[in-house]
Every structure is written in C-alpha cells, then in structure tokens.
Image (cartoon, rainbow, N blue to C red):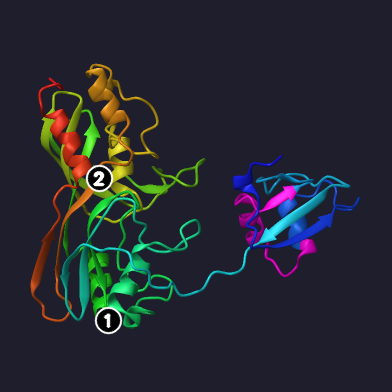
Amino acid sequence: MPDPSTIPDPAATVRAMVADRDAAGQRLDRWLASVFPELSRSRVKALIEAGQASRDGAVTRDPSEPVREGSTYRLGVPAPAPAAPAGQAIPLVVLHEDDDLIVIDKPAGLVVHPAPGNPEGTLVNALIAHCGNSLKGIGGEARPGIVHRLDKDTSGVMVAAKTERAHHALSAAFARRDLERSYLALVWGVPAPAEGRIEAPIGRHPVDRKRMAVVPRGKPAATRYRVLRAFGTAAALLDCRLETGRTHQIRVHLAHLGHPLVGDPAYLRRLPAAARALDPALRAALTGFPRQALHAASLGFTHPATGARLRFDSPLPPDIAALLSRLGDGRDE
C-alpha cells in the first residue's frame, strides 16, 4: 500500500490509462505526455516527481521509468494555483515603513515568496495583507514588492518596495551592489587567515540540482569574511560581506573554505573534525541546531525617493544567541 503522504492530492483531477504494447518500454513522462496532450512533458515530469503518478496503485516518482504493458497508470493533476498570491495575516516585525518601502526583520522559517511546495504562508502573503492591494503587481504578479531574498531558514533584515519607482531603484541598487549588507555566520572551525576574501564561481551542483556548488563554469562570486570571535578551535562567529549575490553564496563559499555553517542542512555533509573534541552536550547542541546559523544583521541603502542614506540593524535571534552563549560559557575551552 502506498505511503498516504505520497497519494496524489485528493482535490486533483485523476487521469488513468492502461499501457498497451506500443507504450511498453517508453519513458513514463514521454508516454503520459503523449496520451494527455493537454499537458506538456515538463509539466508531466514535475507531477511525477511530486508524487502525483502511480502504477497499479503504487506511487512512482521516476519520470524515466520504462512503461510496463498492461499496467494501469494514474496521474493526478492539481487545480492550478492562483497566479497572484493572496494576503494572509502573518505577523511581521517592521523596522521601517513609509509610502515607498517597508523594511522587515524576517524570522527563520518564513519563505519569501510562493513557490512549488510553499504556495502560501510566505512573506509576500504577509506583505500583501499588511500593505493592502496596492502592493499587488509591483515588480511582478508572483513576487510583488520583492527586490531581494533570504533563504527560508536565514533570518534578518529585508527591504520590499511599495511602488514601481521604489522597486526599480532598489533592484538597480542591488544589481550594482550600491548598498551595505552584512551577515553573521556561525561556522565550524576557525578560518585562517582571520580575515579574507573567497573568490570562487558558483553554479548548480553537477549531481544534486537542489544544491549549489563551486564549479568551473559557474557565475563569478566573491565573499569577504572576518572572524569576530573564535570559540577555541571548534567554531567561530564571522562577519560576511557579499560582493556578488549568488544563490546560497555564503553557505557555498564557507563550505568550500572548509568551514560550513553550523546547522546547514544542505552543505554540512558530515560531522566536522572540530566537533570531536567538544564536550558531548555542547557537541549535541551544535550538531542538533535545526537551521543554518546565518543572520542578515544589517542593510544600508539610499532611499529611492528622498535620497537619504538609511541603515537598519537586526539583533541576533534568540536561537543563535543562545548557542553563542553556550559556546562562550567556558565549556568549549
């Protein structure tokens, strides 16, 4: 019996087809796209990978699986999601707001904009509810107001535009790097030298397409770092500054340097050597930290309407602050 969590969405339209002799051996996604021509092959492939396909009652997630003659295949096609996100009453910590923009302190766990797997409950939904329908459509229907993003589990300062003029100006500032952005990162081990620049191109991981990696043909990327505090040889708190803005840049660069972020689910692949000498309770606290220990601590930019230079700071969130306190209480020495 298939795992109930992978049974196609009960609200989906389910289409069924018995494979005949001509279908046998074809790729599953290619065959289903041919028998349901209203669906593109890429759409069929995405549905299969999302667990919306079954063979003889058992869910299959492999688009390249050879079709079996005589088997009954079912494909669930969920109703299309609304093109424009709706407002949702999600609490926001507002650091600044005026007619042109809003600056918020994003908590860890909040996705920035709707996407597959996170169709609602995002920062965009919260901003629409907070700012009203005037925000809709600014900078694009699916991501209104968004000019930059933080990963779901990265906390800290973000700015969003409330007018087209502000969106254009802020987007241009981010593109030119005409702003100040600093991040606090808790990493395994202590980088040497204590201050440096990581320059390494970033692109999709050659095997795991959900991750990024340093790859020869990646996009140019550079990150400056400075050790603010070392906790023995086990860990260090860094100040990081971006010269470029690639996906997962700080996470990828620090892992490439040999000092992955504490708690990083994507780039911390094994127990770091620095963890082995720690007190067991402290080691458990660090290895069990539930998210990447990365915080967007400050953001400075020129106001798109007034020309004033603005800067906003966010204190470390309680979870990272508590971890630093444990590291600094003497048990790490």
> Disc 1 vs disc 2: Cβ atoms closer than 8 Å?
no
Between discs 1 and 2, the one toward the N terminus: 1
Q: Is residue 255 above or below residue 168?
A: above
Q: Is residue 209 visible?
A: yes
Circle 1 sits in a helix, a strand or a loop, which is it? Answer: loop
Q: The residue under label 2 is which amino acid type?
A: Leu
State the residue position of label 1: 163
Residue 226's spot in the image, x, y percent? 13, 41
Q: Is residue 190 visible?
A: no
Residue 166's spot in the image, x, y percent? 24, 78
Q: Specify whether residue 52 is painted magenta.
A: yes
Q: Residue 41 sits in which quadrant? A: bottom right
Residue 34's spot in the image, x, y percent? 78, 62
Q: Is residue 303 above or below residue 317?
A: below
Please give the label number shown on residue 294: 2
Residue furthest out toward the right: 21
Q: Magenta stretch?
A: 34-54
Q: Residue at x 25, y 45 (%)?
A: 294
Q: Is residue 65 left or right of residue 184?
A: right
Q: Residue at x 27, y 54 (%)?
A: 107
Q: Residue at x 30, y 56 (%)?
A: 150
Using a 10 Å C-alpha cutoff, classify the residue at mark 2 as few (fewer than 14 neighbours), some (14 to 19) or many (20 or more).
many
- Front position in the image: 249 or 86: 86
Q: Is residue 219 above or below residue 301?
A: above
Gap in angstroms between the C-alphas marked 1 and 2 = 30 Å
Q: Residue at x 12, y 20 (%)?
A: 333
Residue furthest out toward the left: 308
Q: The residue under label 1 is which amino acid type?
A: Thr
